[in-house]
Every structure is written in C-alpha cells, then in structure tokens.
Amino acid sequence: MIIRTSALDSATMVIELEFGDDGDLVEMMDVRQNGFAVMGEDIPLPLAVIDGRLRTEPWFTEDHLIAIEAHELGHIRTGSCDEPTAEREGIRLLDAAGFVGAADILRDRGIA
C-alpha cells in the first residue's frame, strides 16, 4: 500500500493498493473496481483509493492511474456521488495540471 498526497491536489491523500495488500480497502476495491473516494460528513480527511494492481494489465499506462485519481478527486472536490459530475471535475483538474493524455482517457469514456 502506497500512501501519498495527490499529484493533482496537495490537500488530498491517496492510497494506492498493491498486490499482497489485504483488508477492508482491498475488499471494497474488489467490488468497486479501479478506485473510490472516502468522503462525507463523518470523514475528517477525505481520501482517494486507487487500484495500483492495474499496473500489470497490458493496456495500462500511468495516464490511466492519474485519470482514476482525478475522477475520485472529482467526487471529493464536488462532494458528489454523481459519476458525470465527478468525471467533469476530474477532466478539469487534469487539464489544469497539463495531464492531457489522462484527461483524454476520461473524455473517451463518455461519462461526462
């Protein structure tokens, strides 16, 4: 498990799961796929959880991981569980930070 600050928002923590990790976060990831946000009134420090185990997939690039992170930050920054809202904010964050390839990955999904 890698714990770090977000590459897109220095105020948000990111947990990247790795092979060999176990526990509640891994179980939640196995159901949700790719990533999820931990946020809400009872959460003092929101965080994004992303699935670093995707690094072994043949299609994977680092742009995919930052795109997942941006989408989860979109949920946190907007306070919304709505997927299109999170996607639009994620694209905005990526564009502002110059991650064009990652932003294109989100655009190509067609959710926003």
Image: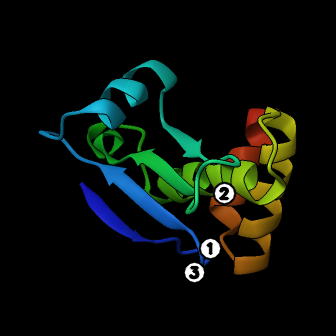
Q: What residue type is labelled 1?
A: Leu
Q: Going 44% across and 47% down the picture, which residue do you hit?
A: 50
Position of 29 with respect to 35 (left or right) is left
Q: In which quarter of the image is the C terminus?
A: top right
Q: Name the element at disc 3.
A: loop
Q: Name the residue under label 3.
A: 10
Sequence-first disc among 2 and 1: 1
In space, the residues marked 3 and 2 are separated at their CA atoms by: 11 Å
Q: Going 78% across and 46% down the picture, which residue do you hit?
A: 86
In space, the residues marked 3 and 1 are separated at their CA atoms by: 7 Å
Q: Where is residue 38 in the image (x, y as percent from the top left)?
A: 56, 45
In space, the residues marked 2 and 1 are separated at their CA atoms by: 8 Å
Position of 79 with respect to 30 (left or right) is right
| Mark 1 Cα-neighbour bin, 10 Å: few <14, some 14–19, many ≥20 | some
* Residue contact at pointers 2 and 1, CB within 8 angstroms: yes
Report the mark closest to the observer, 3 or 1: 3
Closest to the observer, 54 or 59: 54
Q: Mark 1 points at which residue?
A: 8
